[in-house]
Amino acid sequence: MKEPTTADGRTVSRRNYLKLGAGTALSLPLAGCFGFGDDSATDMSGSPSDGSSLTIIKDGTLVPVDPDVGVQEHADVLIEDGEIVEIADTIDEADAEIVDASDAIVLPGFVNSHLHTWQASVRGTTGDWTFSEYLELMLGDVSSRYEPEDAYLGNLFGAVEQLHTGTTTVLDWFHIANSPDHTDRAIDGLEDAGIRSVFAHGPPGDDGDTWWEASTEPHPSDIERLHDERFPANDGLVTLAMGIRGPDYATDEVVEDDITLGRELDIPISMHIGSLGPGGIYNLEELDLLGSDLNYVHGNRFEQEEFELIGDSGGSISITPEVEMQMGMGMPVLGEAIAAGATPTLGVDITSNVSGEMFTQMRMALQAQRALDNQPAVERNEQIESVSLDARRALELATIEGARALGMEDRIGSITPGKRADIVLLRTDDITTAPVHDPVETAVFQAGTSTVDTVLVDGRIVKQDGVVHNKAIETHWSAFEQSGADIIDESVVEPERP
Ligand SMILES: [Zn+2]
């Protein structure tokens, strides 16, 4: 369609045209993917005289990941003060900010249930590594090179990458808690990014042997300071969790103490487990520690009974398929998790390896499981009768199941009235997505970061017209690049540079 123009002849996008028409002062997006002028996309929301904020996402193809709402064409979504309040064919509110979604799929933001956000600074260094190399070189060396400001920069840029790629909630598994300053600056990075996040405070990264080899060190007591001083209510956009070493990396005594502490603090607990070998869940069972507050990362080498123990206790499993398949952990365990009734969720894990976006993880998890399920027929030289998991299920893994794993399913993970407005618009007028026949398939199999047009977190627009608005990114861009270069130069990692 022909783009409209402003009075002075500039061509503007249709979305901005609507905004200009509504009388909202808004500068045109800058070139590239990041706008820097106004970090507060909150100012882009309508502010009626009664002080409330109203936004209508208008005329979109709605993929709500809520069966009670259902997929709808030409749907309007009304947001008031960050809460989804109504979904209908047509909603008119004179004072509302209008976000035109007529060329977009409207879906809940992705929930990335496992990311070491700090590793944004060392992107593209571990893509050819094994898991043993990672433990030795990343957790035994690179992680010790981070200063508090490096932790801030890694978390800021890594979290903004998440927003840019359509993830609105991330569990940040922070294992460079080398000092309270490192931790505080990392949390600052998440806050300045404006992402909804669960900050899983982990161990220091300054001594791999002490913290990751049958560790006898209990979890750092600094988590009690965080709980009491930084997260006293623990109900903001960033909340506190605990990243423990667990049975694969610490003694039973430490595991028991750590989980007991996490439960005293009443926060979710996450651990890496089952990628070195089986049996860790039996330890937890013998210690009578299994529970629905436990999130297990990877689990590739679990025995069947371990999956059943997780399912019976209501735990969740974070599957990070791309990293697991590369590093020799084993095949992703999506099928086992679903069969056992464990909550199956997806994560990126490390951007030192792979892209931070969830589209790839969603597709890899789905297709790897289909391949596993197809294999018996292949070996009999028979044709399969149907695929085992569908696109709708893949989208659930990347949204509502992640919310469930983080104990946030009553607030996020679907576009449902009463939930917070964490919403993504995917362009449907893009060369990679048009024409759309089945919006769920388009979202799962065709869409990617280049089609992430608009992102809202808690009703606040953080990306619009393909442009992320974050002033901290502009301020710190050079420092971020220098930080990454310095860390790698000081470490034993030797990237192949031309
Ligand atoms: Zn991890």
Image: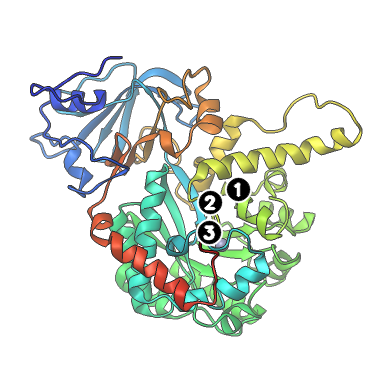
Respond yes or no on whether mark 1 lies under 8 Å from ligand 1. Answer: no
Q: Quadrant of ligand 1?
A: bottom right
Query: Tag 1: residue type?
Result: Thr
Q: Which residue is mark 1?
A: 343
Residue that extends furthest to the top in the rendered view of this protein: 1
Q: Earlier in the sequence, mark 3 or mark 2?
A: 3
Residue that extends furthest to the front in the rendered view of this protein: 498
Q: Quadrant of residue 338?
A: top right
Respond yes or no on whether mark 3 lies under 8 Å from ligand 1. Answer: yes
Alpha-carbon neighbours of circle 1 within 10 Å: few (<14), some, or many (≥20)? many
Query: Tag 2: residue type?
Result: Ala
Asked if the residue at tag 2 contacts the one at tag 1, i.e. Cβ–Cβ closer than 8 Å, the answer is: yes
Q: Where 73 sits versus 95, above or below?
A: above
Q: Earlier in the sequence, mark 3 or mark 1?
A: 1
Specify the label residue 350 is tagged with.
Answer: 3
Q: Is residue 338 left or right of residue 178?
A: right
